[in-house]
Image (tube, helix red, strand yellow):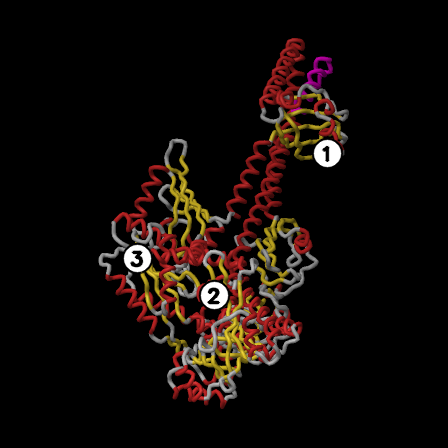
């Protein structure tokens, strides 16, 4: 062997070159092996995560199906009589509809089973010790998921769902329980396994297994709280870990997911043995390849050395020169290869200096000669630990983020140790790849998958012909179809028969021409139900402009549409009678006015107020009043045409819009039919009610050209009909507007009359007919109006009652009358009229009155409160109580206008009347007078005859035994001073 300097130089260069080639090949193979292993492990993790998500959806769907059944039977039991027979009948009628996955059992409040949807002998067995019963003893409406256990009777492997059942008043009726067969879930898991090394487990959050595939029988109810999956789930409800199964002691990559709002966790494990086998195979292939490369390198070195030695013997100088030239070319080719690789390749010695750098290194890290010069200080600190591990002998792979050209970038770095003949690390082969774009694509892909899988909208992707390629979980939740059931089918098969072929033809044409369609369409659920969706179609085109895919997004808006319709109905229709309310009435009235003006046809507005409705409401109660209003609405609808509108404005007020009137007589005919219909008796359960109606009519355009005027005028016409005796109708006339305006002005002036002291009291003497002396007087109010002069009560009391001013007037009259009565002497009585309005709308101020009487040193029996007979006819509980308070205070009561209305002897006895005032119509009939006086005396009631104006009337009253007389025969209303002088003179 040659030992010349040229030979040794050639050998050294050849050794370095071959060593660099070997190291380069080793580094590239190592980097490829590491990347391949990472990708395969990531693929297994993603596979188990998707698998776990699918199993979660499957379990959640099963539990939701069971819970829907629980809710349905709980609601059915709640609204039916709570008896064992009822519960048994409800459950037995649906038992077959659950299949074999679960059944339903109803437990009474003590925990005894009283009915079941499956034919098993559970009646009478007590389950009060079970957790699913104990959990429902406290009020609430939450679904409870019990721990796995064997059935007490069926001995099946079960876990239990339960809900609390209460009646409408919140009373605890029992617990409705759904035992779920865990073996069915295990069968589902078994059928879902993709390979033998995959395991699917469902366990309770208390750490006990509910179902597992495989080995269900051996693992049911097994405690796995010591497992790594159970511990990891406590920190994060969703995750993936590498662990050893406590069941079969095999190493797996396991993904787990906790079911939302349920104490259940799904875990899917996939063995990583395959990954290890693949890695071993790849390592073997890589080792063989490296061995062959090294063999070739060694062979080439030996061949080159021998060739050089032989050549040197022949022509040492010539061969040496040629070899050096070849080595230079080889180095140049090696440099060319390294410079054109897409990754950074460099060699670093133990002093962190670079002895070799390719062109990519300079493009990314610049011209730094060592690591500290190539990297910023913070990145150097981050890289240093990895560098130390590599110099310690480990092959290191890590990812490093850095700022490059004002952009965030990410590099994948690999350090491969270079060892000398003694195994000592003398340097590192450095490889770096810019993986920024790959990271962005991965993040974008994850985000897109996350949005697709978790979107609340249903998503569907079809090919150009409309054949379904993919659907998301929301699609299955809305339609009821799983992905496997619809993939490969045409999308139009999901639609219902609500739309005709023309609709779909127009839809397809729009998509073809625009690539887009949006609207509402009816679909058919898997269970046969139809539901409305808001659908949006988009078209995806390829690079040549051809249709590649159709993407559909849809949302179930059935409930939203139903809610909108219910809200619209509540806003526009009366909840009691289902007639249009005031809002809908005003809208339709304006529409009819526009229509009538356009067609030049007259229109009528009818305003109806029920007579006597308040009496029915007060005497029979509001429930009967509601029934009456419903029947009134039905009768009104029967009296009008289909084109007319009947509305309820509120209370007992109704309106009718008569449109397109061709004959004026149609209005009268319809109104008379309404009056006759309302006058017929109403059957209210076991009661009979009699009412009538007062009707006002205004015509368009004669009585008004807008809605507000027509409503106001018809209301005024109705008011006049009520004043004229009720159960009649009136057309609007201009004088009604004047009278209404006058009442408004009078009401405003009346409010200031008390403050301005414009009210006066006059007293009309009441004579004792037996002795001929004045022993009583009736206090009569007058209004000394500054412009209209002295007004009598008939001219303003009605307005006072309508505006509520009567309360202040009544209080003033009592105070003035009490003050005057004190000056008339003991034993003299003053009669004060009490408005019926005060009895209906306010409490009678008895305590205040007694205080006034005590201040005047006046006995309560000196005051007589006059009430009308009509008040007794409509007396309700409040009126009776206020009447009784007057009696308890010692005040006497006089019944005015007796015989004018529908008198009842029961009223005289019930309310303990002190005085009766005979109506004027009885003064000329001695027989009637005698009968009434005799009856009153038998009831210990004194009789006062009103409006006695001549001696003939006086003779009849004297003969009948009447006690007192009042009228112009004895004296007209006079002031207190004149009455005082009259009493002194007698």
Residues at marks 3 and 2, CA–CA distance in whole angstroms: 33 Å
Of the pair 945 and 352, the residue shown nearer to us: 945
- Image spot of residue 443 (x, y percent): 57, 38
- Image spot of residue 421 (x, y percent): 75, 29
Q: Secondary structure at mark 1?
A: helix
Residues at marks 3 and 1, CA–CA distance in whole angstroms: 95 Å
Rendered image: mark on residue 386? 1
Work out whether mark 2 precedes mark 1 in sequence or the reverse, and give the earlier one.
Answer: 1
Write down the residue under mark 2. Answer: 797
Residue for point 61% across, 57% down: 265
In the image, residue 326 lies in the stretch drawn in magenta? no
Residue 260 placement: quadrant: bottom right
Residues at marks 2 and 1, CA–CA distance in whole angstroms: 104 Å
Of the pair 885 and 242, the residue shown nearer to us: 885
Of the pair 810 and 368, the residue shown nearer to us: 810
Instruction: Determine the residue located farthest toward the left in the rendered image.
Output: 663
Residue for point 57% across, 46% down: 46
In the image, residue 13 lies in the stretch drawn in magenta? yes
Quadrant (top left, top right, bottom left, bottom right) of the C terminus: bottom right
> Does the image show residue 558?
no
- Image spot of residue 803 (x, y percent): 49, 61
The residue stretch that appears in magenta? 1-20
Q: Residues within 10 Å of mark 2 (few under 14, many from 20)?
A: some
Quadrant (top left, top right, bottom left, bottom right) of the N terminus: top right
Residue 586 placement: quadrant: bottom left
């Amino acid at each position: 062997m040659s030992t010349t300097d040229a030979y040794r130089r050639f050998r050294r260069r050849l050794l370095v070159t071959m060593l660099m080639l070997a190291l380069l090949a080793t580094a590239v193979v190592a980097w490829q092996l590491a990347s391949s292993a990472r990708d395969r492990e990531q693929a297994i993790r993603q596979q188990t995560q998707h698998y776990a998500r699918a199993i979660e959806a499957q379990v959640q769907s099963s539990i939701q199906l069971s819970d829907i059944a629980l809710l349905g039977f709980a609601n059915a039991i709640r609204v039916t009589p709570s008896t064992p027979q009822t519960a048994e009948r409800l459950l037995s009628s649906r038992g077959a509809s659950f299949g074999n996955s679960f059944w339903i059992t109803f437990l009474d409040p003590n925990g005894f089973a009283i009915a079941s949807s499956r034919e098993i002998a559970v009646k009478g067995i007590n389950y009060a010790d079970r957790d699913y019963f104990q959990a429902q003893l406290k009020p609430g409406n939450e679904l409870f998921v019990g721990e796995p256990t064997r059935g007490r009777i069926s001995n099946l492997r079960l876990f239990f769902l339960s809900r609390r059942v209460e009646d409408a008043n919140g009373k605890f009726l029992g617990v409705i329980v759904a035992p779920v067969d865990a073996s069915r879930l295990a069968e589902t898991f078994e059928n879902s396994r993709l390979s033998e090394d995959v395991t699917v487990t469902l366990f309770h959050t208390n750490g006990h297994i509910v179902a597992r595939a495989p080995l269900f029988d051996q693992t049911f109810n097994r405690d796995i709280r010591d497992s790594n999956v159970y511990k990891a789930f406590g920190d994060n409800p969703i995750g993936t870990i590498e662990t050893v199964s406590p069941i079969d002691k095999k190493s797996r990559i396991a993904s787990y997911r906790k079911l939302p709002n349920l104490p259940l966790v799904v875990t899917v494990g996939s063995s990583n043995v395959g990954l290890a086998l693949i890695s071993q195979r790849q390592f073997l292939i890589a080792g063989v390849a490296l061995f062959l490369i090294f063999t070739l390198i060694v062979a080439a070195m030996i061949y080159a050395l021998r060739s050089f030695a032989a050549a040197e013997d022949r022509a040492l100088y010539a061969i040496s020169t040629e070899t050096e030239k070849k080595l230079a070319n080889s180095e140049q080719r090696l440099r060319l290869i390294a410079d054109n690789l897409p990754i950074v390749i460099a060699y670093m010695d133990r002093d962190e200096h670079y002895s070799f750098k390719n062109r990519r290194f300079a493009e990314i890290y610049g011209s730094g000669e060592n690591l500290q010069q190539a990297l910023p200080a913070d990145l150097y600190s981050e890289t240093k630990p990895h560098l130390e591990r590599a110099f310690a002998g480990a092959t290191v792979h890590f990812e490093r983020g850095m700022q490059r050209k004002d952009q965030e970038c990410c590099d994948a770095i690999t350090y491969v140790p270079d060892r000398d003949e003694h195994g000592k690390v003398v340097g590192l082969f450095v490889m770096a790849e810019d993986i920024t774009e790959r990271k962005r694509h991965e993040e974008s892909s994850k985000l897109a998958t996350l949005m697709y899988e978790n979107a609340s909208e249903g998503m569907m992707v079809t090919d150009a012909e409309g054949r379904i390629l993919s659907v998301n979980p929301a699609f299955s939740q809305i339609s009821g179809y799983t992905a496997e059931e619809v993939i490969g089918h045409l999308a139009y098969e999901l639609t219902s028969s609500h739309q005709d072929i023309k609709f779909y033809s127009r839809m397809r044409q729009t998509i073809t021409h625009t690539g887009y369609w949006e609207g509402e369409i009816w679909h058919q659920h898997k269970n046969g139900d139809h539901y409305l969706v808001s659908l949006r179609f988009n078209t995806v085109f390829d690079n040549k402009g051809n249709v590649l895919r159709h993407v559909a997004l849809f949302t179930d808006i059935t409930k939203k549409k139903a809610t909108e319709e219910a809200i619209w109905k509540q806003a526009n229709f009366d909840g009691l009678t289902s007639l249009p309310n005031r809002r809908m009435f005003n809208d339709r009235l304006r529409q009819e006015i526009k229509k009538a003006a356009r067609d030049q046809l007259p229109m009528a507005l009818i305003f109806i107020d029920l007579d006597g409705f308040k009496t029915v409401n007060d005497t029979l109660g509001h429930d009967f009043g509601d029934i009456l209003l419903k029947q009134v609405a039905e009768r009104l609808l029967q009296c009008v045409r289909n084109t007319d509108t009947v509305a309820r404005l509120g209370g007992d007020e109704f309106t009718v819009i008569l449109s397109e009137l061709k004959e004026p007589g149609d209005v009268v005919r319809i109104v008379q039919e309404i009056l006759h219909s309302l006058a017929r008796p109403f059957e209210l359960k076991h009661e009979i009610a009699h009412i009538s109606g007062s009707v006002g009519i205004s015509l368009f355009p004669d009585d008004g050209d807008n809605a507000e005027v027509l409503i106001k005028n018809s209301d005024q016409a109705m008011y006049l009909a009520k004043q004229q005796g009720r159960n009649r109708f009136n057309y609007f006339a201009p004088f009604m507007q004047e009278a209404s305006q006058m009442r408004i002005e009078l009401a405003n002036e009346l409010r200031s009359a008390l403050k301005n002291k414009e009210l006066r009291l006059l007293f009309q003497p009441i004579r004792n007919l037996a002795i001929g002396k004045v022993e009583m007087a009736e206090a009569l109010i007058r209004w000394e109006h500054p412009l209209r002069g002295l007004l009598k009560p008939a001219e303003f009391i009605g307005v006072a009652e309508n505006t509520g001013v009567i309360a202040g007037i009544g209080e003033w009259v009592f105070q003035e009358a009490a003050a005057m009565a004190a000056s008339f002497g003991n034993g003299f009585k003053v009669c004060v009229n009490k408005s019926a309005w005060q009895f209906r709308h306010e409490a009678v101020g008895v305590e205040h009155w007694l205080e006034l009487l005590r201040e005047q040193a006046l006995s309560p029996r000196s005051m007589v409160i006059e009430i009308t007979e009509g008040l007794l006819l409509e007396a309700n509980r409040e009126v009776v109580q206020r009447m009784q308070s007057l009696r308890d205070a010692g005040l006497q009561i006089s019944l005015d206008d007796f015989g004018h209305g529908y008198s009842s002897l029961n009223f005289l006895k019930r309310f303990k009347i002190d005085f009766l005032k005979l109506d004027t119509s009885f003064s000329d009939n001695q027989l009637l007078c005698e009968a009434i006086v005799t009856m009153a005396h038998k009831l210990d009631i004194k009789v006062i005859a009103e409006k006695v104006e001549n001696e003939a009337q006086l003779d009849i009253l004297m003969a009948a035994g009447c006690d007192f007389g009042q009228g112009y025969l004895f004296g007209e209303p006079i002031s207190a001073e004149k009455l005082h002088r009259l009493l002194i003179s007698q």
